[in-house]
Image: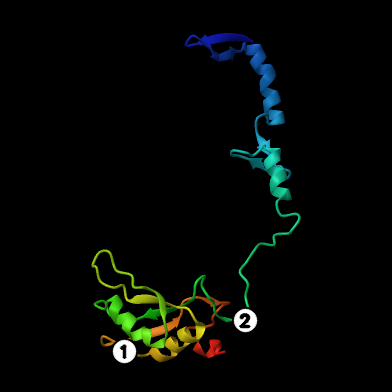
Amino acid sequence: ARWKKARGRMADAEPVMDEDEYEEEAPQQAAGSKGKRTDDAGRRVKGRGASDTAARMEHEGRYSGRSGQFESLETDGGKGPAKSVEGWIIFVMGINEEANEEDVYDKFSDFGDIKNLQLPLDRRTGFVKGYALVEFELRKEAQAAIEGMNGADLMEQTLSVDWAFSKGPIKGRASTRRKTDA
């Protein structure tokens, strides 16, 4: 094959093939699928790293020792509320859009020391979105708040209070109070 120089640089040089050389090379490419990568099953593989055997070896050996056993949080077993990192969080729904943190804090502080209170606001309107997250340090305080405030009124709206996090699936929309009493 002869080489032709493109734009004066040898790096961009391309081979120029005579017609007889082209005819000899064309059947080889079609028969051997030269340049196309395939996997073990014969399927065509595309993309970066498709022919990288080191990546394939790493993928195969990644979980071989521990067989996909991953770290997880310790559980005491069974269904029910799950403790967050710092405390027990309850989810309060049905809060009036004109309520403020002080109103919610006053209602729920009767049940114990509140560690954290989140009352999200709608960015567009500036009003409360209608729910709050209240965090208690002790489970019995959070349980007392759920039992005492579920169905109670705050600014002429009925509140619905339940655990924010729970372990295992909860069947139906029934309250989890019956399932978590310990």
- Whether 61 is drawn above or below 162: the answer is above
Mark 1: few, some, or many residues within 10 Å (few <14, many ≥20)? some
The amino acid type found where label 1 is placed reads Asp
Disc 2 target residue: 78
* Residue 159 in sight in this render: no
Q: Is residue 19 left or right of residue 85?
A: right
- Residue pictured at 50% horizontal, 86% vertical: 140
Quarter of the rendering occupied by the N terminus: top right
- Earlier in the chain: of badge 1 and badge 2, it is 2
Q: CA distance from mark 1 to mark 2?
A: 32 Å
Mark 2: few, some, or many residues within 10 Å (few <14, many ≥20)? few
Residue 148 image point, x, y percent? 41, 91
- SS of the residue under disc 1: strand
Residue 32 image point, x, y percent? 71, 30
State the residue in front, 94 or 113: 113
Disc 1 target residue: 153
The part of the image, by quadrant, that contains residue 21 is top right
Residue 83 image point, x, y percent? 53, 76
The amino acid type found where label 2 is placed reads Gly
Q: Is residue 48 left or right of residue 67?
A: left
State the residue in front, 139 or 152: 139
Residue 177 image point, x, y percent? 50, 88
- Whether 15 is drawn above or below 61: the answer is above
Disc number for residue 60? none
